[in-house]
Amino acid sequence: MARAQSTDVERSLGRRMRGAAGLAALAGLAWVARDVPAALGGRLSGARAERAARSPQFREGTFHNQAGTRTMVAEPGRNLLRELIFGKQKRRPTAPVPLLRPSASALPGRAGAPDAADTADELNIVWYGHASTLIEIEGRRVLLDPVWSERCSPSALVGPRRLHEPPVGIDELPPLDAILISHDHYDHLDMATVQALLAGQSAPFLVPLGVGAHLDRWGVPAERIIELDWSESHQVAGLEITATAAQHFSGRGLRRDGTLWSSWVVAGARRTVFYTGDSGYFDGYAAIGAEHGPFDVTLMQIGAYDRAWPTIHMFPEEAVSAHLDLRGGLFVPVHWATFNLALHDWSEPVDRLWAEAKARDVRLAVPHPGERVVVDDPPAVDGWWQAVA
């Protein structure tokens, strides 16, 4: 009898412990997931929704590309999930990605830096990884698609994880004049990064139509949000910044294309820069080049492509064609090396790019993350990535 009573007590205790463990696990998941609803962003409403509805790109409740596109193309006999799990591609570097830190003393406005007269024709590019890039133009600074988080995801537990650290901390960035966002995908628009820039910088956020709803939810004041449709421009710090067409899509949750996507033109008095954002190859590049070019430098998306989504991301060879359509000078590749977002080898985009640039006599710079590229005197391409591929 005593043994039976003891067994019953043990079973009861075991059930209670398992119940407590289950509750603790649920509480832990709830704690980790507490920021996910906010990270999904906001929804268009009120005056913002009314403005979106007036856009030539908006119809039947969503934004559209100039030409028809598909975000996934079925291929007979190909199983993308099986390829993702069992594919032989080398989708990660084999050794740490070599990072460089741009010299703070070389930044305009810092002690020991050049004065305003010396920066009148300045044009430098600092690529921090993936699409996050700093443009130093005529003494002004414009930051593109900043993502400093460990994952490009609404969750801290799941989603693509960084393959290298940011070469500088977000609190080490110099004072910015503008922050540009190309679209609302997680690898281009990150809640934690936006909130850090909100606290540490005073620059406005320039975004495509509708993306301001996300910034609203994250606490960015209305006076720091400037939303633009394609072909609309805004003057900031002596620069003219124009939202231009791209061929992509948007969405942070189940709803697709509720906000616009764009490429960007950054023009000073003498120097001009083009940034693709994410885009497939399309004839809009020639139109942008004719209206806004030639460009001293183009920042071109080269990674995360696949024949399963050929119209929304460029292959490296297409990026070279786009650069030539744009009448670009120096080509600097972005959107590779930092997050594993496709099935190709980690180094394949830049290997293919280098070969195509040589074949078509395109000036190319492939910086390490954090390396400053002086556009008028760029470093020679040295194949640094091949040592860690």
Image (cartoon, helix red, strand yellow):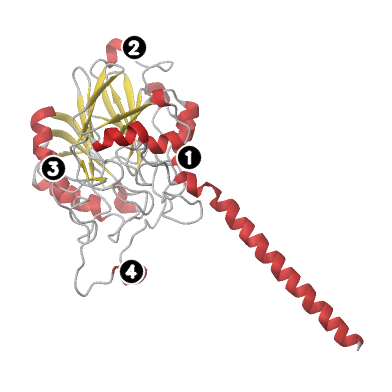
| Mark with earlier residue (4, 3) | 4
| Mark with earlier residue (2, 4) | 4
| Residue receiving disc 2 | 115
| Residue receiving disc 4 | 81
Q: CA distance from mark 1 to mark 2?
A: 34 Å
Residue 165 seen: yes
| Residue receiving disc 3 | 322
* Residue drawn at the location 37% of the way across and 69% of the way down: 85
- Callout 4: helix, strand or loop? helix
| Residue count near mark 1 (Cα–Cα under 10 Å), binned few <14, some 14–19, many ≥20 | some
Callout 3, which amino acid?
Ala
Snapshot quadrant of residue 268: top left
| Residue receiving disc 1 | 192
Of tags 1 and 3, which is closer to the observer? 1
- Callout 3: helix, strand or loop? helix
What percent of the width, then of the height, locates residue 158?
47, 57
Callout 4, which amino acid?
Leu
Snapshot quadrant of residue 114: top left
| Mark with earlier residue (1, 3) | 1
* Residue drawn at the location 50% of the way across and 51% of the way down: 156
| Mark with earlier residue (3, 2) | 2
* Residue drawn at the location 13% of the way across and 48% of the way down: 67
Tell whether 39 sits left or right of 10: left
Tell whether 51 sits left or right of 85: left
Residue 293 seen: no
Q: Camera-side residue: 6 or 108?
A: 6
Callout 1, which amino acid?
Ala
Quick check: marks 1 and 4 in contact, CB under 8 Å? no
Of tags 4 and 3, which is closer to the observer? 4
| Mark with earlier residue (1, 4) | 4
Quick check: marks 1 and 2 in contact, CB under 8 Å? no
Of tags 1 and 2, which is closer to the observer? 1
